[in-house]
Image (cartoon, coloured by chain):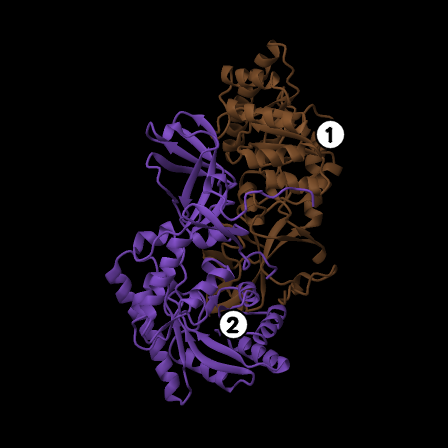
Chain colours: A purple, B brown
Amino acid sequence: MAYDLSPNLAPGTQKKDLDTPCYLIDLDVMERNIEKMAAYFRGRTANLRPHMKHHKTPEIALKQIAAGAIGVCCQKLGEAEAMADGGVDNILITYEIIGTAKILRLMNLAKRVNLMVTVDDPDNVADLSQAAQAAGVDLGILVDVNSGQNRCGIDPGSPAVALAQSVAKSPGLVLNGLCGYEGHLQSVADLEERTTRAREAMSRVTATAEAIRKDGIDVEIVSAGGTGTYNITGDYPGVTEVQAGSYVLMDASYRKVLHDFDLAGTILSTVISRGAPDRAVLDCGMKALSSDQWPPLVVGLPGVEVGGISDEHLSVQLTDSDSRQLRPGDQVELVPAHNDTTVHLHDHLFAMRAGELEMVWVVAGRGRIR
Amino acid sequence: MAYDLSPNLAPGTQKKDLDTPCYLIDLDVMERNIEKMAAYFRGRTANLRPHMKHHKTPEIALKQIAAGAIGVCCQKLGEAEAMADGGVDNILITYEIIGTAKILRLMNLAKRVNLMVTVDDPDNVADLSQAAQAAGVDLGILVDVNSGQNRCGIDPGSPAVALAQSVAKSPGLVLNGLCGYEGHLQSVADLEERTTRAREAMSRVTATAEAIRKDGIDVEIVSAGGTGTYNITGDYPGVTEVQAGSYVLMDASYRKVLHDFDLAGTILSTVISRGAPDRAVLDCGMKALSSDQWPPLVVGLPGVEVGGISDEHLSVQLTDSDSRQLRPGDQVELVPAHNDTTVHLHDHLFAMRAGELEMVWVVAGRGRIR
């Protein structure tokens, strides 16, 4: 192909020389976040199994594992395949894997890594059992319990117990335990309310685990928790794994409810137009900076206020004389409101240290036919 | 790499056998849309130069050109490079190209296709002139005029005239004309209001063109219009090119204001969970179906109502006894609310005819380092 990629990918390239829009990681901040979360889990009953939907990048996963994480969570089969390709060998897919094509891929993955997947449906259990037998693998299973989010998951108590019993009896499958992610509570602003409600949610899952154990069936794993509840679920009796992901790069939305971790991920953009004395237009629209949560934060430019976004444009209001000096070509850096959907827009993450490019990572977990 | 792609990519594969989530095109519908728009422009003063931000796929561009389009518009340099790689040789980039790295790529592109780009800033004109001379190319320029959208673009009248004069005098640059996209009017629901306001917007651009011509400077091109105003700008005296793009695949948002074209693009999804009698969860979240406009439309299942969306889940309410028969593994097809940001999430488009896969297209214009 005859097109030119940006020439500015060499280690040591200054931020000011990077082509935009691009996703930047401040490595010092990210590494502090990874270490802080890992330190919290050292010596605790619960382990950290961070979620990869946040960054989809094996190189970051390996740093998390090196700091103490026992493995990773993935939301999609394609993410899990990318993690396995990148050297991660202990993976929980927190998603129901449905259909012949995906189940075949799942079995191939189970042959090369330590793999678990969640289930909430008896027919799916039967399909997985049949495929696992055909493939000659023992597939780890967590029963997905609806702890209150009302999305996927089987009801706690007897429905979940019955499904777990069925898994335990299914050849090719190994019942490892339960999964009960309280996603609806991650952004509850009031910490006391978040704590109370997360404990309520956890109690539904751990009570179900107890009920299963009463039948003589081992429940080794109870997986729950996110970044907004990491130290609530991480301390909750009976929870053995916490799925927190967003602590690594963080984003403006999580920052509203949690200050334990710092902002490590930003979008670097360029002013492309100055249409009016109080308006500039940046080259990061919805195809570079997701708009499903709002607003992003402007880094270090107090007089720049985020306005309307379209596919490839972000309009900003310039509210003081300093910001009105911005010219086409000047760079503006923004913290995404929602990191996970923003990373998903990018093929590459630019890993920076002290304002210089250290390396470029491929977002290997995005974009596969899945 | 050891992972498996979906095996179901062979021509003739039935829709029911496709892995999901994936983006489907109904080729019969798309080809009708392409022909209908092309037919409108036959024998008219204005030409059709459709916008590629809609689908980013050279194979579709070539069909549009074969039907009569004079070339294409692109929103990003990377899209234009992808179109050139795919065989498109007449490209207008409706975007300000700023900065050394991108301007160098722009010049390389100008060496191999008939290329125009928009400008709204004197310094950018100077940079492009210098780079074009160094590269030994004559770069086509449209002055970007703010016809009322208040995003990019220089004010109509004397500011735009002065910039056009400066372009006309700049070695390496060729003033081809003006661009005045009235993006803020595309979705005005009332046709009469849309017509009146689009004509007002056009009059600002065409009056500026006349003022430039009074100075003896040729203004060959006046580019404007979108799918929502194609037959308003397409008939407006002095407009020579219309940039409509969304008529090809359409989406649920455009469909609210325009029925001239049919819905050709859908997301095929699979039920992955049935958590409650009246709830199902689909495998198309915000990473497969953009949520910046809302809601998507469910195709052919009256009892299925769209509920909440998260990264990889779409919850739907099941409001009748038929829809409550849905089981994990069943497919549900949805029309995106906003096509352009949805296509951008996918690496491949599955081109279907009569329910069978005809071919798989790569969305070549997305994801490059740009």
Between residue A36 and residue A113, name the one nearer to us: A36
Between residue A227 and residue B194, name the one nearer to us: A227
The quarter of the rendered structure image containing the C terminus of chain A is bottom right
> Is residue B246 visible in the rendered structure shown here?
no
Residue B304 in percent (x, y) is at 51, 59
Residue located farthest toward the front when viewing the structure as drawn: A12
Residue A358 in percent (x, y) is at 48, 51
User: Which residue in the structure is indicated by mark 1?
Assistant: B42
Residue located farthest toward the bottom when viewing the structure as drawn: A216
Name above or below for residue A77 compared with residue A270: below
The tally of labels here is 2
**Whether label 1 touches label 2, CB < 8 Å:** no
> Which residue does the image show at 26% across and 57% down from the upper left?
A190
Name above or below for residue A355 compared with residue B233: below
The subunit carrying tag 1 is: B
Residue A233 in percent (x, y) is at 32, 69
Point out which mark residue A89 bears.
2
10 Å crowding of disc 1: few (<14), some (14-19), many (20+) = some
Residue type, mark 2 in image = Asp
The subunit carrying tag 2 is: A
Residue B49 in percent (x, y) is at 66, 32
| Both marks 1 and 2 on one chain | no
- Front of the two marks 1 and 2: 2
> Which residue does the image show at 46% across and 48% down from the upper left?
A24
10 Å crowding of disc 2: few (<14), some (14-19), many (20+) = some
Label 2, secondary structure: give it: loop
Residue type, mark 1 in image = Arg
Position of B153 compared to B8: left or right?
Answer: left
